[in-house]
Image (cartoon, rainbow, N blue to C red):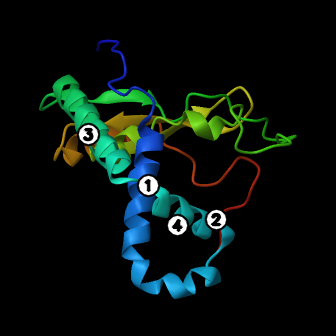
Amino acid sequence: MERVASPSDNDTIWNWFIMSTAQLTQSLRHEEHRWGELSDYVQAQLQFGSSVTIDQYIAAQRKRHEISIRFDDLLGNDAVLLTPTANARSWPAEGPLPARAGNTDDPMVTLNTPDANFTGHPATSVPMGLDDNGVPCGIHITGPRFADNLTLGLASHIERIKPWPLTAPGYAPFDF
């Protein structure tokens, strides 16, 4: 085991958003007359995607390639990268929730999962226990390209060592 720096430079989500909204907009271009029927959120994505320039799109693709190479170099053929699924502390299970969502205090902006989504490396998140606030936390396993067996195998091994309860403490199991 070795401690390493992240191959990402933390602009993964921004570059993914540029590419995905441009692709979404292009895919739905033939239905533009129906965009008004979509949710405000999807309409905002389509509006943003319509504003992406070719230069922005190419720059995002280049960044994707650059970060992918860094992950390839780090992982080789048989290494895995273990990170917390999220880098932020959770909110207390009993509340209160933050008054505003989507700000820089929002734990959702510190996920480790987008890098694998952006580069196409296989990844698996496994529950690891409860944090200090009683909220489940996980470990994120990223592996080399085409080595899904490594991430899934390690996840399976972790689950055998530390099984995750299917029912939260104090709750009855679902009855189908």
| Quadrant including the N terminus | top left
CB atoms of marks 2 and 4 within 8 Å:
no
Residue at (33% x, 14% y) in the render: 4
Q: Quadrant of residue 20?
A: bottom left
Q: Amino acid at mark 1?
A: Val
CB atoms of marks 2 and 1 within 8 Å:
no
Question: Any mark on residue 41, and which?
Answer: 2
Q: Earlier in the sequence, mark 2 or mark 1?
A: 2
Q: Is residue 79 visible?
A: no
Question: Any mark on residue 52, and which?
Answer: 1
| Residue wearing tag 3 | 62
Q: Is residue 76 visible?
A: yes
Front residue of this view, candidates 168 and 134? 134
Q: Earlier in the sequence, mark 2 or mark 4?
A: 2
Question: Any mark on residue 46, and which?
Answer: 4
Q: Amino acid at mark 3?
A: Arg
Residue at (65% x, 35% y) in the render: 107
Looking at the rendered image, the disc whose residue lies closer to the viewer, 1 or 3, is 1
- Mark 4, Cα crowd under 10 Å, few <14 / some 14-19 / many 20+, is many
